[in-house]
Amino acid sequence: MSSKFVIHGGKPLTGSIKVSGSKNAALPCIAATILGNTPSTLQNVPKIDDVFKMLEILEYLGAKVDWQKDNLIIDPRPIISKILPHSLVESLRASILFLGPLLSRFGEVKMAFPGGCVIGKRSVRAHINALRDMGAEAIETQGLLHLKLKKNIPTKIIMWEISVTATENILMACANQNDKNLISLAASEPHVQNLCQMLSKMGAKIKGAGTSSINIQGCKALKGVTHKVTGDYLEMGLFAIAAATVPGSKLEITGVETDHLDSFWNKFREAGVKFKLEKCKATVEYTKKLTSFSKLDTRIYPGFPTDLQAPFSILMTQSHGVSRIFETLFESRLNYLYELEKMGAKIEIYNPHQALVIGPTQLHGTNVESCDLRAGATLVLAGLIARGQTHVFNINYIDRGHEKLEEKLNKLGADIERREI
Ligand code: EPU
């Protein structure tokens, strides 16, 4: 059974909203619990499909998983070493995050290649190369990732590219070894920092989290901990765009430090959005006269996040003039623009990485399809400002990363109905 959202657009959003815990922080923290010799409690974990899939894999391995309200308790002690089959990892790219901790705990790991959202070619090379550098051997096995840890070589691990999940994998692999490693060209996103905080509490010594050079001295006896998953800055961005573009809206958005989004607020300033920032609260108001952007180019953190590129295009459809999108990371992350075009947006797509949005346009409701998680949330934003009814299909993508998105928006004044089809 699948579902769709039916959105009656044009309803102002007002009030206060606390964002959920971050998906991209929760997933590595869940994988990291494998390394503890006692249970861990994770707080602020979003109840989303990607989290449930991660937990399904943990349970398959033998872990005991228990939700107590919003706390997630994971006992990793019964886990045994088993091949992770295609059926478990095919729909979740983040299942790659089991590679580092399982390798480190059992000395060997075998898993099928992970699947996930279709947003571009996503090689596992950065993961394999880094684990090889720290002393693992990659064994050629048909259709499987198979790694064996020979010995941990205290070394400088130069990441093959600045990759979020590959950095997280190597951090988790090193955390459970006695040697000291330097990870160069590390990713610095808030979710990588959040994982570093958890690994430090477990017993690893980490310096440089949040920079591109991380020193990690591991420890063979990591313990389970209580750890709070950081709030979702991407969700803060999403609500901020909704408040700026839906006529009559004004929102207070809390639940995460606003400085996780500095490059995003820069673009808000450029567009002329009315907003105010405090440490953990953004207040954003509907802004009638928005100006276009010379360029919105996505970059690794602290640059503009690729995961907010699609939502930001909604602001562009309401801005006066021509705005340019340059998606530098992924090559299939502009496909949602064809759906926005169906709603009346004026768009020119030059190639898989570059497009123009010409505004302002009054969007109108129609049938549209999500092609990935962030694209799906973008179509919900479009539906909120559109005239008439918007039917968003394939909302399973949205459920992967947003906890009850429609309920949160409805509490603020939106009119979104989830309908089974
Ligand atoms: N890339 C570059 N240049 C770089 C670094 C990366 O072009 O300097 C390219 C890579 O080649 C790759 C892509 O960018 O194709 C993604 O890079 P990365 O390896 O960092 O991505 P990831 O670890 O697979 C995580 C998030 C994604 C998010 C990206 C980028 C998790 C579980 N996933 O993926 O989240 O888009 O980082 O920030 O943390 C999402 O939440 O919807 C999502 C897809």
Image: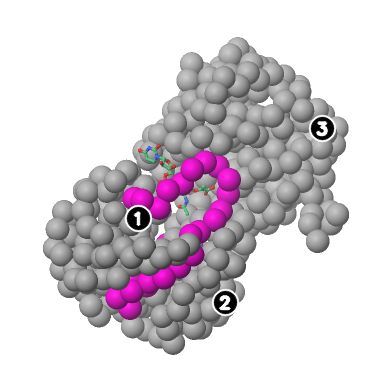
Within 10 Å of disc 3 (Cα), the crowding (few <14, some 14-19, many 20+) is many
Q: Is mark 3 on a helix, strand or loop?
A: loop
Indicate whether 308 appears above or below 340: below
Mark 3 highlights which residue?
A: 365
In the drawing, what numbered circle is on residue 27?
none
Q: Which amino acid does label 1 sit on?
A: His
State the residue position of label 2. Answer: 67
Residue at the spot 77% in from the left edge and 28% down from the top edge: 343
Q: Does the magenta stretch include residue 192?
A: no
Amino acid tagged 2: Trp
Label 3 is placed on what type of residue? Answer: Gly
Image: 298 above or below 36: above
Q: Write down the residue under mark 1.
A: 127
Percent of width and height locating residue 33: 40, 73
Residue located farthest toward the bottom when viewing the structure as drawn: 78
Which quarter of the figure has residue 273?
top right
Indicate which label's residue lies in the foreground, 2 or 3: 3
